[in-house]
Structures are given as C-alpha cells and as structure tokens.
Amino acid sequence: MSESTPAASSPGFIRAVGVLGLSAAIFNCTVGGGIFRLPAGAAAAAGSAAPFVYLICAAVMACVVLCFAEAGSRVAQTGGPYAYIEAVFGRYAGFLAGVLLWMVGTTAVAGVASAFAEGVATLIGLPSARIAILVATFGLLAAVNVRGVEQGTRLILVASVAKLLPLLVFVGVGVFFITPDNLIIERMPAAADLARAAIILIFAFSGVESALVPSGEVKDPARTVPRALALAMIGVTLLYLAVHLVAQGLLGPRLAEATVAPLAFAAEAFLGQPGYLLLLIGASISMFGYVSGMTLAVPRALWKFADEGLLPKPLAAVHRDYRTPHVAILVQCTLLLFVAIFNSFEQLAVISNLAALLLYAAVALATLLLRRRGVQQGGGLPFKVPGGPLVPLLTVALIAWLLTSITVAEWSALLTTLAVASLLYAVTQRRGLVKGVEE
C-alpha cells in the first residue's frame, strides 16, 4: 500500500462508475454461493427464530455500510477499506488491513470451493470425488486466469447472470407451498446462540469491502457511494429473508439437517426432482462464479505485496505474453486448493467473517477520525453518518458482541497470520525493501 496523500483520486483512473453500476457491483459481490448453504446453519443455531438472525446481520451491516459510505466519500482513492485505514492510522495499519482483506478473500474462496465440490459430488452421485473436483476446479481457474483477465471475466459474467434465476424461481414459486406452522417461533435462543448464528450467517452479507476497492473510479463519491450502498444492501437483505422464509416454511425443523444443499431439498418439496436439480445446479453455478471472480481478484493482492517488497520478488513476476501475474495466480490457487481440501465451508466461513469484522471495526474507527480531521479528498461535500459518533461506536460495539462467539482456535488462526505478516513487514522495512522507504 502506498503512502496516503490528499490527492483527489488515484492517477490515471477514469471516474465512470455511477450509483446503479456500483450498486450492481456490491450486490454481485455480496450475493454469492453462501446463501445456498447458510440457511441450514442459521436454522441449526437459532431454530425457527433464524429470520431474526438475518435482521441482526442486516443491522450490523447497515452500521458498517454507513461507516463505509462516509469513509468512501472522504477518501476517494482506489483501495477501499485499506485506503481508509491507511489514511488515518498509517502505513503499517494499512498493510494489516490489506492482509485482512487478503485473508477474507482466501478463506471465503476456499470455503465456497469446498461447498461447491461437495455439491457437485452430490449432484453426480460420487461423494468421494470432492478432492478430485477441487483439483480440477483450481487447475482450470489457474489456467484461465494466467491466460488473461478477459477470459476470467467471461466466466464471472456468465455465472453472475445465472445465479439469480434459481433463487427467484425458488422464492416466486415456493412461497405458494409453505406450511405456515413452520414459521411459528416457539422460543427465542439465548444471546450467545444468536451471536454464534450471526457470526456464521454474516458471511452471506460480506463483500462490500471488495466492491469498494475501486473507489478511485467512482463518479462523485460523496453522492454515489452512500446511495449505492443503501440500494444494494436493502436488496440483499430482502432477497435473503425471502429465501430463508420460503425454505423454513417448506422444511420446518428439517432445514437444519439439510447441511449440503438446503435449498435444493426445499425445492424438491414443491417441484420434485426437477426442482432439486435446478437449485443444486444453480448453487453450483453460483459458487463456481464466486470462486471464479475471487480467484481473478485475490492473487493481485499477493502480486501487490511482492511488488512493494513485502513478499518474495518472484511473486511480482508478470507473464511475458499474457501480461498477468502468473506466479501469484499459481501460488494463490495452490494455497486455496490445500485450504479447501482440509477444511469445511463452515470452518472457513467463520475465519473469513472474523477477519472481515475486524476490518469493519477498523473502518468504523477510521470514520470517526476522518471526520474529526476534516479529510475531504473527493469533489463535493462528504456524506456524514447521522447521529455524530453514535453509529461508528455502535458498529464497534455490535462487532465486539459478535466476536464473543469466536473460539480460541479461530482466533489463533487469524492472529498467527497477522503475526507472520507483521514479521515480514518488519524485515522488509529494516532492509529498506518496501517502496517508498528510501524516499
């Protein structure tokens, strides 16, 4: 990450992204494969009260989104959350934010890939084929992305269009077949159970941090960012609530038991085998689309770290013919493969959420300081979160509550990663390898 300056935007970028374009990007980054899998986990943790967990996640994300909206309207540089954090807390904090962002992407992609492989193995009737499917998936994605960004984006486009169709069919038709008694809430879970359910389910709401990375290419960020965030997150919340209510209304307590493909089993209840196949195939396409998109993006973080001297220089290599960071792509895909093989979707989703929530809390604190210092890099007046410091502080408090459900093992995985990254940062700073250190 380069030193933060009061420049209006990143040099060389054209501000062409408007409200609808940014809303679509946020919606696409947020609605991934998780929603096809997470209703079962929410039902297992909170029972028939699971819809309240969606509202808890929506409330947390609403606060987070407001903080992102103000920070994004004040810091108009490409980089998203790590640009906001670096502008306030300095280079090292910005570096750690970049590491957290990379960790969010890595664990999320590996988790969704694990679920994708399980779903495809179920679809073809060969549960033992999970590892072979993972090897084939990351082998294909590595080959496609090494050959060029254009080929990678074609995969993303097809999957993005296809993933919404089965969800809309599921909600639009399934709503006429629900059993009202299945929606009755018999008891409210304890606060600790709600926190654990939310820490799992919030995976389905994350993605805003990735969509806002190209903030330097947004037109009138003070106006565009808050409006796009509000529009996208309202749509996401309504879609998720509708999907869960239909699934719960169809399956009742059985929803918690359908851990591999809950929506497919729910669709089977009113569409039979064709419905089951439609949702299972739809889930597979959606998950593959998510993995494809993030496999295109995440290796660029490794390349950036290497280019700035924070990782071995070979990772910063660019292919002579294809002009892609081929070494970073191959290393990242290999890492993703091993992480996905040895971990389940649920395990990786929680670690991804932990990294994301820490990033969100840092952005909330950065928002307070950006406002206090009067930072205003973009054109026009910046957006101000209503209520003064209330929303950023409430954001931190809600995140702290959610983090009470994180286990020691989950904390250890994240803190070990940050410790190794900090050691690399210290070594490169000491040797003067980081760009800008000698200047």
Image (cartoon, rainbow, N blue to C red):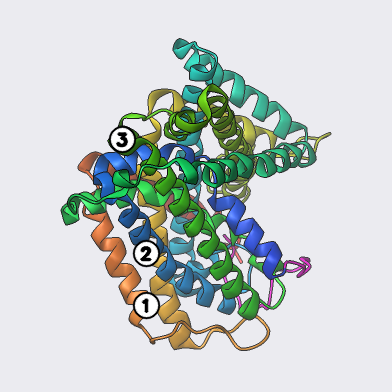
Evaluate whether residue 24 shows in this view: yes
Residue 10 drawn in magenta: yes
Q: Which mark is residue 256?
A: 3
Residue 60 numbered tag? 2
Which residues are drawn in magenta? Answer: 1-17
x then y, percent, for residue 16? 77, 68
Q: Amino acid at mark 1?
A: Val
Q: Is residue 148 magenta?
A: no
Give the CA distance from mark 1 to mark 3. Answer: 34 Å
- Tell me, yes or no, if residue 3 can be seen here: no
In this view, 382 is above or below 201: below
Position of 166 with respect to 125 (left or right) is: right
Q: Residue furthest right?
A: 321
Looking at the picture, which amino acid does disc 2 mark? Val
Q: Main secondary structure of the magenta part?
A: loop
Disc 3 residue type (three-letter): Ala
Residue 155 location (% of width, % of height) = 72, 36
The circle drawn on residue 200 is none
Badge 1 crowding class, 10 Å Cα cut-off, few under 14, some 14 to 19, many 20 or more, is: many
- Report which residue position mark 1 lands on: 391
